[in-house]
Amino acid sequence: MPSPHTPTADTAPPPWSQPAPSVLAGLGVNPRQGLDRQEARRRLRRFGPNRLRPPRHRSAWQVLLAQFKSLMMLLLALAALLAFGLGQTVDGAAILAVLGLNVAIGFTVELRGVRSMEALYRLTRLKVRVRRGGHVKQIATEQLVPGDLVLLEGGDKVGADLRLLEAANLQVDESALTGESLPVTKGIEPVPADSPLAERSTMLYSGTHLVQGSGEAVVVATGLATELGRIATLVTQIPDKATPLEQKLALLGQKLIWLTLALAALLALAGIWVGREPVAMLKIAIALAVAAVPEGLPVVATIALARGMWRMARQNALINRLAAVETLGATAVICTDKTGTLTENRLSLARLLLASGEQAELAEAGFEGTGQDSPQLRQALELAVLCNNASLDEGGLGDPLEVALLAAGRQAGLEREALLRRWPELREEAFSTDSRMMASFHQGPDGIRVAVKGAPEAVLAACAFEGSGDQAEPMVDARRQHWLAQNQRLAKQGLRVLALAEGRAANIEAEPYQGLSLLALVGLMDPPRQDVALALAQCRAAGIRVVMVTGDQAATAAHVARQLGLDGDQPLVVAQGKALRPLDEMSEPDKVAALATSVFARVEPAQKLRLVALHQEAGAVVAMTGDGVNDAPALKQADIGIAMGQRGTQVAREAAAMVLKDDAFATLVLAVRQGRIIFDNIRSFVLYLLSCNISELMVVALATLADAPLPLLPLQILYLNLVTDVFPALALGVGPGAPGVMERPPRPRAEAVIDGRHWLAILGYGSSITFAVLGAFALALGPLALAPAAAVTIAFLTLALAQLWHLFNMRQPGSSWRHNAIVRNPYAWAALALCLVLLWLALYLPPLAALLHLEPPGLTGWALVLSASLLPLLLGQSLKALNLTQRKHP
């Protein structure tokens, strides 16, 4: 698709060099109405969806071919070739069957994971506000078409190439496109047609984001026709990278492969040394090398992580980076915003204190306490509606605070559109964290009117008067202190307080924040979320520290924190954000005090960053919530950056590792719980796989070194490797987790998946299974005087069942042997049932029994098999009860 703004000799001048009305006329769009529905659909069909490329789609064939790239699969293929080369056709075919089954299982679970990730991408599409058919709507960025009118706020990510129509204090970070590190100022005046991209001040480009300000713009190019799209067509796709956890598991698998190969070679040499046939020992060594390697390790890890991400998505927590799943379980500190996360984010105007001395409260029937027709009340509400960028369309779009002010104005009969016709807007001074105020300039019959709203302390500092018109009085220090005390009174009631003021300006370039006259203090109510108190109690039980970090006043924040029981029965420690100085400027007592603080008020973005770094310096894994563009540095600094899905800016979402679709703190706690479960599951199946593989290796190795008959044949080992490895491990990987997972402290940051105590447990479990198998084999050959084939069957069944019962040894320490995560896991029972069916087929299906050289063991044989196979389970459960095997979790 050609770019609508690519200048050629046969087209109109580019949009950055044309006046805004000419651009609108060329695109055939009414600036007041925007595109209607039919025209938007027609243009969408013509230009296509507004996207560069969807996430790289992996076909089923690509997923299938990827299964053959691992070292484990190559080992299986090499073993099959060697078997065929030695004339062992049946063995070679069996190894190929094992290879095929491993590929089939890996293909199935990975394809499901890939499709899950593609579905998650569709859930995380960005939204944008547009004017269509005269109404403000929120649509997916992909639905933008040339001619759409886009409404912009600081923090928005630009989703298409836009020509500005209005701009108020607009600064844009174009580093993603131009490499320029500093934000650039944008305006609406045309620039020369030959201006380089970095100097096109009237344009906003896809992939950039607004640092501050607001504006309105028209879409001039979408998709691959944008400047970013042109670059994207020249860039090859970056190959996928493994997450840290996947890298650790892959490294573990590689080490085990080489260790197994070395042991298999030593075993073959030992067997030859004691007089066994070299060809037979080579076959056994090949089978052992294949059987002892945990082929299912990367497959199960992938499906465990992907399934965990999908579970989180269904609970409104979208994970942007797979590595975050692992880190979530170690979270020790959560720094959370108040508004919309701990509270409902359903702001409503509750009370006004007017400069005239009147008070008004908003009820369903209207304003109480002063007449609805009070001139002072209407004038204050006029300011609240004029100095506003929200819309009441679709139930309210924009900042919830501004939506609440518009709703209050509507109850008084004041509509923003009607007020703007009476007081046309000339300019806007966007809200900034430095000034903590916002202003708008409006043309009136007797000059320019300036409407201001913002933090009471900031507005009062800029006020020289209180009241309006002839009733205005000088703002003396005593009155300023009076209003500051009123502000504190409202804040202590849990209200979010704003000040409304107005001024006069000689021209639109005048300084807005000087010589103002205070009209009112406005108290807005935002009730706490009902589920937050329970979520905070869960965090305390889990050893997770929760710190409230808010831009609100200390009194408001403390009131909400006490309502929610943020610190339980402990005294609440509250501090101002200014206490968070750069770390190199803080003394040790200052750091200790900051680490003990539970509520930080009036916090600026840079202070959030310092708070995260402070807790990380103390050794904690930190999660940080944020919603604004200025929160992006803190979100990146945190171990887990968490953006808000409803009120968060697009830039914050991209900087974060996780997005809360419902903005709820309880959802964050659910995600932490799921992160702990996933890590526990991964540790459990790694522990299970390795202990089973060690037992297989030790059984044959000890028998060979003792010059005893081989208790297992190569094909039997290969069959067992499938039956007892993959399916139970998969069941452990997707388990629901232990009920008490949130009743223990977070794991240390540097804790490995498998550490020294786990290796001891693996060796212990493997040894118990080995001695059970060799003991049953010895009894079958000795006291029971069974034939060698029958004794091998006894060893085969004992090993298989012992490994299956071993699944129950993976329960959490401290849990009951009857009530635990394994017993409650339906996948575990399904895996056991499937494996038992496969064992039954191996014994009683004649072709398979003949292939594996198995025969029914009889009642005496079954009694021996069952009693011997239960010994490792009984030993493991006894040690678990004594808490000797592990300390906290498997």
Image (cartoon, grey):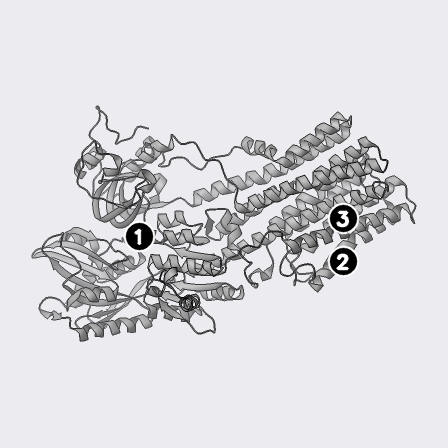
Please indicate whether residue 9 sits to the left or right of residue 396 in the image: left
Q: Secondary structure at mark 1?
A: loop
Q: Which mark is residue 602?
A: none
Where is residue 437? Give x, y as percent.
Answer: 24, 59
Where is residue 426? Give x, y as percent.
Answer: 15, 50
- Residue tagged by mark 3? 801
The residue most toward the left is: 446
Which label lies toward us, 1 or 2?
Answer: 2
The CA distance from mark 2 to mark 3 is 13 Å
Amino acid of disc 3: Leu
Neighbor class of circle 1 (other Cα within 10 Å; few <14, some 14-19, many 20+) is: some
Which label lies toward us, 2 or 3?
Answer: 2
Neighbor class of circle 2 (other Cα within 10 Å; few <14, some 14-19, many 20+) is: some
Work out whether 407 lies above or below 290. Answer: below
Which of marks 1 and 3 precedes in the sequence? 1
- Residue tagged by mark 2? 874
Amino acid of disc 1: Leu
Find residue 561 and report its image quarter: bottom left
- Residue 465 vs residue 276, the one in the foreground: 276
Q: Secondary structure at mark 3?
A: helix
- Residue tagged by mark 1? 397
